Image (spheres, grey):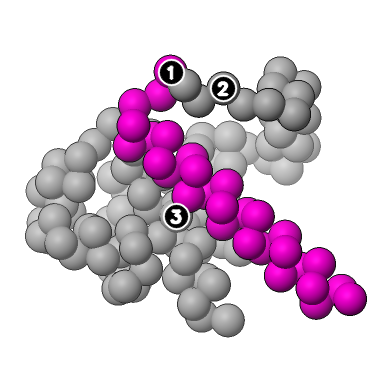
Amino acid sequence: MYKEYDNKLAMKLKMLRLDAGLSQEEFAAKMGISRSCVANYETGKRFPSINMIKKIAEIYGIMTDVLIGNNLCSGYRMCESDPEDYDRKRRKILQDHGNTLDISHLPTEYKISMIEYYNYIQSKQRKSQISEN
């Protein structure tokens, strides 16, 4: 149970950092921690303290609930909206992209993150299907 939670947080932390256009070194400097500590947070090897979670939320301008919530929303601003607005934005994303998503224009680091996220979602779906059978 905790491992799954740690993986969600790790994914959110990495996607938030990439979305902000920060390197691990730059984010570490803002946090006052080492780059290796950031790497450990993003891989789920370490879990940030409550004070660190507060500081991370402050840096990104989000609520701590976005980081520790159960959904996989990585903290994008639409997560802070009311539920109806969030749902409307999700439907628009699906409408705009259909069954495909072109990531060819993204930098390599973003592509890797997208693929890692996709693999994570596939794994969750397979586990869910197995447990239903």
Q: Which residue is mark 2?
A: 102
Disc assigned to residue 105: 1
26 horizontally vs 92: left or right: left
Q: How far is disc 3 from disc 1 in space, using C-alphas?
A: 21 Å
87 in magenta: no
Residue 108 higher or lower than 30, as above or below: above
- Describe residue 86's horizontal placement relative to residue 21 as left or right: right
| Mark 2 element type | loop
* Residue 104 horizontal side relative to residue 14, left or right: right
Marks 1 and 2, how far apart in space? 8 Å
Q: Residues within 10 Å of mark 3 (few under 14, many from 20)?
A: many
| Residue on which disc 3 sits | 11
Q: Which residues are magenta?
A: 105-133
- Quick one: label 3 or label 2, which is nearer the N terminus? 3
Q: Residue at x 50, y 62 (%)?
A: 8
Residue 40 visible (yes or no): yes
Q: Which residue does the image show at 56% across and 57% down from the upper left? A: 120
Q: Position of residue 80 (x, y in %)?
A: 56, 41
117 in the magenta segment: yes
The answer for how far apart the CA atoms under marks 3 and 2 are is 20 Å
